[in-house]
Structure formats: structure tokens, C-alpha cells
Image (cartoon, helix red, strand yellow):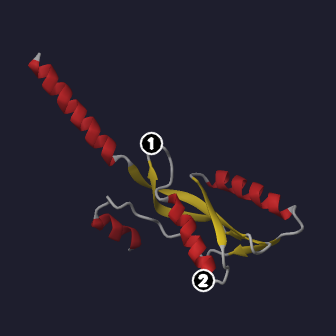
Amino acid sequence: MRNKFIYLGILFILFFVLTINAANKRTKLYMYGVVTSFNDSTIYFTDIMEIDSVWVDSKTGFLYSRNNYSYQLRNYMRNKGVAYPTCVTSYAKKRKDIEKKYSKLKKKYINSKALNIKYIPANEFRYIPIVPDDVVVEEKEDIFD
């Protein structure tokens, strides 16, 4: 009886450790951004980008620190002179899925004649992967080499 409790305790600890380590995993995603401003009638679209080494929560599938990717785009637009940009970053695991989202959103704005649409090419703006705080330093250095 005592051995069963020890065995169950070891299994519980092993399960717990594996669950914690699997919380975030590195993967490849496709992303694009959209920028609007309430002070302007211009809408900006980035190119669809393939980003390697982004971190995703393995349980939920959410992009780690996904709001900071929009902040990267917002800071880029502020540096370009857009006073109050509102930025949205969209992502998907498959290129086909992100292209579908991209074309649907673009079509929505193209049909509106009152808006001016501009594109931000990938050679001007590129998302930088955000590394979780609990990842060891060696892995962080590996991403940027």
C-alpha cells in the first residue's frame, strides 16, 4: 500500500514537471499587422511574415506576449510620424489560414472608398520574436544568432 502512494506521488511530480516545461514552446508562425488611426483615414497593412522561433502556449495555442507584437508595430508607426496608431497583429500556424484572414480584412477596407490604404513592406518593418522570461539565457542567445 505504501509503495502505491510513493509510486503515485512520483507520477504526480513527473506529470507536474512535464506540464510546467511544456507551457511554452518555440514554433514558426505567420503574422501580419494592421494600423489605423482615428486622426487619419489611412490604413496600413504589413506584409505577411514568416517568423521563426516565436513562443506559443502549448495548451491554449496563444502567442506568448501577443500584445507586445502590436506594440512593436505601434512604435514603428510612431517613428514614421503617425501620432496615435491603433495596431492589431494577427497570426496563424498555416500560411493558407493567415492569407485567408488577410484577404478578408483587406477586402473589407478596399470596398470603402473613403479610406486610403498603404502597405508596409517586410524590408521596412519586421516582427522580432519575444522570448519568455523563464527561458534560460543560452536559448535566448540562440534565437538571435
Residue position marked by numbered label 1 in the rendering: 59
| Horizontal and vertical percent position of residue 45 | 70, 69
**Which residue is at 11% across, 21% downward?**
3
Q: Residue furthest top?
A: 1
Label 1 crowding class (10 Å Cα cut-off): few <14, some 14-19, many 20+?
A: few
- Quarter of the image with the C terminus in it: bottom left
The vertical placement of 83 against 54, above or below, is below
Q: Is residue 123 visible?
A: no
Q: Amino acid at mark 2?
A: Asn
| Horizontal and vertical percent position of residue 102 | 71, 58
Looking at the image, which is closer to me, 33 or 139?
Answer: 33
**Which residue is at 63% across, 77% downward?**
77
Looking at the image, which is closer to me, 140 or 134?
Answer: 134
Disc 2 element:
helix
| Horizontal and vertical percent position of residue 123 | 61, 79
**Which residue is at 61% across, 79% downward?**
78
Q: Amino acid at mark 1?
A: Lys
N-terminal of the two: label 1 or label 2?
1
Residue position marked by numbered label 2 in the rendering: 79
Query: Along the horizontal axis of the image, is 21 left or right of 91?
Result: left
